Image: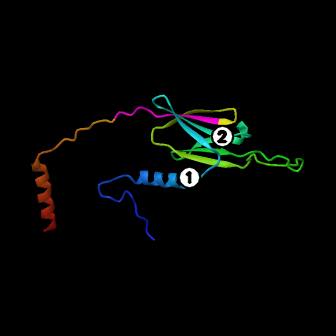
Amino acid sequence: MSRVSLFNSPLLLGFEQIERTLDRVAKSSGEGYPPYNIEQIGENGIRITVAVAGFTLGDLQVTIEDNQLVIRGRRQEEDDDERIYLHRGIASRQFQRSFVLADGIEVTGAHTDNGLLHVALERPQVEAPVRTIKIESGEKGQNNAINVANMAE
């Protein structure tokens, strides 16, 4: 079965990377654990806050892989043989949460506070450059067309 692409129009050239990014976002959107917030901080700042109660600094890892911010948590094994739980409602499973980053987004830091992991990002102010393309006279274009026609004979 072939897949219909949103970017298969001849007017959309070079958008393959965006299509791949949308595929990655669609795959990771079904994740529900751990819960997180994304906040706008100032004009160019973004903060991602992930609930990591029970995880120590050594249990957490924040990496950037192929324009993706990846947050992993893996708790050290405890001696559960010694404990007898009457109710176990605190999740202690490992997790991986991914966020696709736009080009130019920089991770400026991360810290934990009261069971929350805060990851600070900054979106640089981008100025769109305007380029002028030189238009050459028709003689060059005509000469090229004549040369191609002569080669075909």
Q: What percent of the width, then of the height, locates residue 140?
A: 13, 50
Indicate which disc, 2 or 1, sits on the residue closer to the N terminus.
Answer: 1
The quarter of the picture where residue 38 lies is: top right
Secondary element at image label 1: helix
Q: Which amino acid does the dot numbered 1 rest on?
A: Ser
Residue 118 forms part of the magenta stretch: yes
For label 2, the residue is: 51
Specify whether residue 38 is painted magenta.
no
View extreme (right): residue: 82
Residue at image point 35% right, 59% down:
8
Residue 149 in picture, x, y percent from top left: 13, 63
The residue labelled by disc 1 is 28
Secondary element type, mark 2: strand
What residue span does the magenta drawing correspond to? 117-127
Place of residue 90 in the rendered image (x, y in percent of width and height, measured from the top left) = 75, 45
Three-letter residue code for mark 2:
Ala
Q: Residue furthest top?
A: 42
Horizontal and vertical percent for residue 24?
Answer: 51, 53
On screen, residue 83 versus residue 68, left or right, reads right
Q: CA distance from mark 2 to mark 1?
A: 17 Å
Residue nearest the observer in this picture, 31 or 66: 31
Dot 2 surroundings within 10 Å: few (below 14), some, or many (20 or more)? some
